[in-house]
Amino acid sequence: MTEPPQNLPPDAARSEVPVAFEDPSYLAAVVDLLGAIAYGEMSAFERLAEDAKMSPTLADKAELARMASTEFSHFDGLRVRLAELGADPFEAMDPFQKPFDAFHARTAPSDWLEGLVKAYVGDGLAADFYREIAAFLDTGTRDLIIESLADAGQSRFVVDRVRGAIAEDPRLGGRLALWGRRLMGEALSQAQRVAAERDALSALLSGGVDRPGMDLAAIGLLVTRLTENHSKRMEALGLSA
Amino acid sequence: MTEPPQNLPPDAARSEVPVAFEDPSYLAAVVDLLGAIAYGEMSAFERLAEDAKMSPTLADKAELARMASTEFSHFDGLRVRLAELGADPFEAMDPFQKPFDAFHARTAPSDWLEGLVKAYVGDGLAADFYREIAAFLDTGTRDLIIESLADAGQSRFVVDRVRGAIAEDPRLGGRLALWGRRLMGEALSQAQRVAAERDALSALLSGGVDRPGMDLAAIGLLVTRLTENHSKRMEALGLSA
């Protein structure tokens, strides 16, 4: 038996699943996490497509449509991975629909610039947060998450447009700075709600017998890092955090 | 001078432009046509993203988001080609914004199924029409257009969902058949308006000294072919044309 099998079963992809997934609580936590990110990408697609309507020019609209399409392709990669892990991708996404939709309903931008700031600040914060969690995961899952969160050049576009608008009308700076702070507050509040409700995710963060986890002090440091990165993004936009 | 040039100018892509484009009226007609298709793809992106909101399930929403992203990638290919031809892609799209937006405003679907029928019937009709025009063009432009109009598997999804819905509630068939006829009527009326206003496009259809064109009889046959294909699509959906 040195020959590779000639007829792979239809679920052969599962053989790619690393040994860590033999622990059902680890599998449940990863499915939860990928479901959360996938729903986040899908709702980012929807939000960007919606914000595209407010674009001042066709070229700006095309940039937002590009960002939306990038979010969709990230979503699609996560959907495929969830199926490989034996999960129904849409069932995995379902628990996150309510908190994400609530976040978006509470932070509906009133104009094009607020939409850009939200895309930049919100996606940046989400990416930081998921990357922190990814550090506790198997390499394959970690790489997929990091790839899903990659910036497809949109940050530069947003920074250019927001700084340009403030240069033309400096009064915008105050309003957009307030907006950025509100986004951060709403995002942290929804994230706390999700963490409290999803036992598998919380268990992942607090570790296991053979896995390092985060104690309260470590979670405090995580929040500090998220806040610092948020301030840097606000600075990049020319806004006080 | 048998060596190829070592330092290509930044607009080297233009050297890929075939000799047909030395005729400025041909170039203008192709820019017009690609501008029309590009705006059509962009507005299809917007429409599908909007219709995705009405999806009964997350999985359906993901399918519409996939269709929207496919339209965006087609748009992006046309945008690149317009730039290679020395045109500003967004200026080329601009004259088509009004008639396309008018078409979409007059045919806003009132529910998810009307949105699916519109995506299928409308995109099919547009694809047929552009393919007919592409037959008069240089190979490169023709191939790009045909590629931009390729179905990315969405037809099968739409046919399945619409037939499934009618099987469950046969009364839907009458309403959706009326809807399909209205879409065809509105599309033809907008297409006539565009053809009448865009001299370069009309000149392309009527031919030139060294290019075959369409006489009135040929245009009559074109409309017959479009109508026949429309009827076939309606049949595929289980609707009477």
Image (tube, coloured by chain):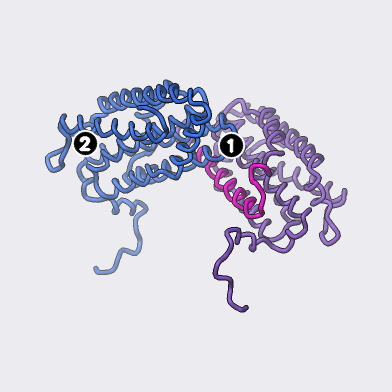
Chain colours: A blue, B purple
Residue B120, how many percent across, how many down?
62, 40
Do residues under tags 1 and 2 come within 8 Å of each other at their CB atoms?
A: no
Where is residue B147 drawn, in percent x and y? 61, 53
Query: Which part of the image, by quadrant, shows the N terminus of chain A?
Result: bottom left
Horizontal and vertical percent position of residue A122: 39, 31
Left or right for A69, reference B79: left
Which residue is labeled 2 in the image?
Answer: A204
Q: Nearer the viewer, residue B112 or A109?
A: A109
Examine the image and state in which quarter residue A230 appears. top left
Q: Residue at x 60, y 40 (%)?
A: B42
Looking at the rendered image, the disc whose residue lies closer to the viewer, 1 or 2, is: 2
Mark 1 falls on what kind of element? Answer: helix
Q: Which residues are magenta?
A: B65-91
Element on which disc 2 rests: helix
Marks 1/2 same chain: no
Measured from the top left, where is residue B156 in percent x and y? 56, 44
At 34% from the left and 29% from the top, the residue drawn is: A95
**Residue A44 position (above or below residue A99):** below
Residue that lies at the very extreme toward the right in this rendered image: B216
Quadrant housing residue B213:
bottom right
Q: Is residue B179 left or right of residue A68?
A: right
Which chain is mark 1 on?
B
Mark 1 highlights which residue? B163
Question: Which residue appears at 71% of the width and 45% of the height?
Answer: B229
The kind of residue on which mark 1 rests is Arg
Q: Tell whether position B172 is magenta.
A: no
Q: Is residue B150 visible?
A: no
User: Image height check: is B95 above or below A111?
Assistant: below
Q: Is residue B85 magenta?
A: yes
Residue type at numbered disc 2: Leu
In percent of the image, x 72 and y 47: which residue is there? B32
Q: Chain of mark 2?
A: A
